[in-house]
Amino acid sequence: MFAAFLQYLFSGLTSGAIYALAGLGFAIIYNSSHVINFAQGEFIMIGGMATATMVAAGLPLPLAIALSMLASMMVGVALEKFAIEPARNSDVVTIIIITIGASIFLRGAAQILWDKEFHSLPAFSGETPIGVFGATLMPQSLWVFGVSGAVIVALWWFFNRTMFGKAMLGTSHNRLAAQLVGVGVKKVLLASFALSALLGAVGGVVVTPITFTNYEAGIMLGLKGFSAAVLGGLGNGGGAIVGGLIVGIAEALASGYLSSAYKDAIAFIIILFVLFFMPNGLFGKRGTDRV
Amino acid sequence: MLAVVITVAPLGFSNSYYYDVAVNAMFNAIVCVGLNLLIGYAGQISLGHAGFFALGAYGSALLTASWGLPPIAAMLISATVVGLLAFVVGRPILKLKGHYLAMATLGIGIIIHIVLKTEAKITGGPDGMSVDNFSLLGFTVMGDRMWYWVVGILLILTVWLALNLIDSPVGRALRAVHGSEVGAEVVGVDTSSYKVLVFVVSAVFASMVGSLFAHKNGFITPDIGSFMHSVELVVMVVLGGMASVFGALIGAVILTLLPQFLAVVEQYEAMILGAIMMGTMIFLPKGLLPSIVSAFKRREGGQ
Amino acid sequence: MSLLKVESLSKEFGGVHAIENLTFSVEPGDIHSIIGPNGAGKTTLFNLITGVYTPSAGRVLFQDRLVSGMKPYELAALGMSRTFQNLQIFFNMKAIENVMVGHHLHLDRRFLSSLLRLPKMRRADHECRDFCAGLMEFVGLAKYLDADAASMPYGALKRLEIARALAAKPRMLLLDEPAAGLNATESREIDEVIKKVASTGVTVVLVEHDMKMVMGISDYITALDYGRKLAEGTPAEVRANPEVVAAYLGAHA
Ligand SMILES: Nc1ncnc2c1ncn2[C@@H]1O[C@H](COP(=O)(O)OP(=O)(O)OP(=O)(O)O)[C@@H](O)[C@H]1O
Ligand SMILES: [Mg+2]
């Protein structure tokens, strides 16, 4: 009983951590530009696919990871520069179509650059399961927890302790103030896309040994990340993390105890339920619209 | 004018494949004219309309196959059920704005898609299920040519109704919701009810076309309700031109034909489609038709 | 009998008391002005009266009916209509269509009628268009009859909002800074429009910073500061009130 529960919890926390990273990616970009980047999932895919192919080609893992992150960040920057920047002042719908277009484009490119097959990576530190109260934990899951935790701490430090990070947060509240400290809005936008792409790639790399990846892997991961971000309240980093973990754990429990076929539906059922009662997510800003 | 185009177009159709593509383009056009009322005119996004389309298709398939209902009854019952569903979920979700609304509608579409995929005992699961011909009062619609004329007439009817609606008290209230909700409220427009109304109407359009599509195609799979199909529908509306009935129509036709042309460069299809989506939105954010129209006006003004 | 009664009304925004324990009433047929320095709570008061915001405490009675908690569109049906300080124009529509939306409550609003647009509906729509064109001329927008709202200058849009509000045929019209941003000539024209509206029996509640205009046309004035009532009375009484003068000069700050 308890062992089974623990088992589901582990698997939920593992995917939850990835959703949280994806959700954070959404939150960072949303904060700086009020854009929802539907190509966020593709960053995860690129991270995983690039690392997997480079390792398969004989590159050492750390080098492959570093190069993939770099590649993903470059894609993020290019996306901002060529697709988002020129359409800064457009409607919500217009920008949604642009980022969905970008995600389709990136998937198409991935399919040509690589292929339609599934790719995998060897686990970073072996495949010997660790027994915990009757449940088993794969060492790779520990990597996922550890890396996600480290990334979150690093982000916290960046946004609260560095000048540039504070300015980035500042732009979301007050453009002028950010400009006063000498941080241009354009730079902040570029940085937010680069950072989100990096987060996505990190998630993609650590999770690939567990789930495998292919050119389409980003779609669901991206949508789950979006759910996480909305669940927590758009633009709220902490909310996105909590949202990601809730979605991941609920999914794992539901597929364990109810039906695994409906695993993917759970995130969206939770989201609808929460939005029915809290139109701004769990921790979103509430307030009266000014007229 | 539309009537003329529909009548004349077949002169250029050398075989039934052309009719087939044209029928699909018109199916999409009908859905998009309905969806445009929601997105373009009332300003509310939906990333889940393929779900309503699929429910209509499966509703018709199931009601005719296992209950032996006549297709027309199956279609109307499905549309009523979809309308009710849209009404029930529409109330709470249309209170949401912008990205939250996008998320909620997306969620509804995906849940429908997953249910259709999973309940294999009823729907045949991912393998799909076959559907009989459409017949009414002993008369059976068969073959691409006959479908062409039937759907052509329905499209003209749809466009006529949409044009009527837009230029009427209800249509103006819908557009006012887009312009300023509070501005509309204070002169007596019950904005939440109007949003639900247009959501239901567009869902019913999608459901009815879904039913017809099922009969025409003879075979359906859950992927007609996928997220990507919902996105395609929105892209058709936005590409052709939001808040323009003919824009939505043109968008639907272009996006239905596009894969036919891109078939030659099959590998690059996705990349090209993505690039077109980004390009149009960046350079012609109002969509093709309105941009062309205003370019014309500007030239006339300049002379 | 007062047309509008505001009783112990309060509105708080996360600690900010925008309106605090405010009581006053508006008599039918009057031009009743609400004045006060920036941030005094005038717009908030309008939003509370017209149902855009719900009060934190207190109540609003319109024609002796408790109306606080009702939706703006329900209040519109009871005869309230307003304009906004920050324009709420339907920029996606033509100017005249903006006004026609204002006439919404007086038209056939059934979905089927709209969908089929039968001759009866066409005729009614035609009459509505004529009526609204008349209103546009009334507020001085004759030359914008065919214009897109998005192409009109600011001053014209302010009048367009007045025409839209009038199209609803209100008993009480609330105007939030109708002359803000207008030049002297335009202000005087708005002044005339308000007087003409009042002469048809419509009660006008006016928020305006242009003191010359306020003192000239008001029958009664309520002065606010920090969400509380500072003074009330005829223009002459309010002008003579030292607290009002002080509030405007910021002497007590
Ligand atoms: N939606 C809102 N959310 C939070 N605070 C608000 C909101 N609306 C108004 N306030 C605050 O309430 C106070 C009163 O604002 P209000 O707009 O009513 O003043 P006003 O008298 O209309 O000022 P002005 O003459 O500048 O138009 C201000 O402190 C304002 O910041
Ligand atoms: Mg104000």
Image (cartoon, rainbow, N blue to C red):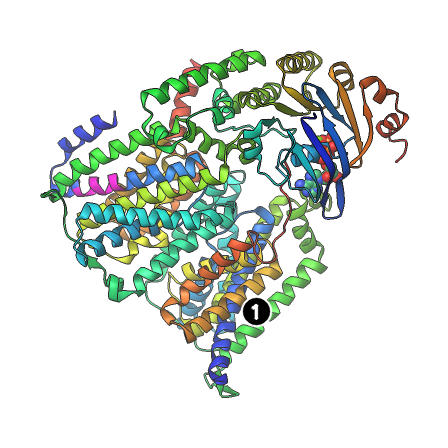
Q: Which of B189 and A84 is in front in this view?
A: B189
Residue A12 visible here: yes
Tell me which segment is drawn in magenta. B20-27
Q: Is residue B24 located in the magenta-colored stretch of the structure?
A: yes
Q: Position of residue A164 (x, y in %)?
A: 68, 53
Residue A64 visible here: no
- For label 1, the residue is A148
Q: Position of residue C102 (x, y in %)?
A: 52, 25
Q: Give above or below for A281 relative to C191.
A: below
Q: Where is residue B36 in the image (x, y as percent from the top left)?
A: 38, 37
* Image point (42%, 43%), residue name: B278
Quadrant in which the N terminus of chain B is drawn: top left
Looking at the image, residue C88 sits to the left or right of residue B298; the answer is: right
* Image point (45%, 68%), residue name: A51
SS category of the residue bearing label 1: helix
Q: Position of residue B231 (x, y in %)?
A: 38, 48
> Amino acid under label 1?
Ser
Mark 1 chain: A
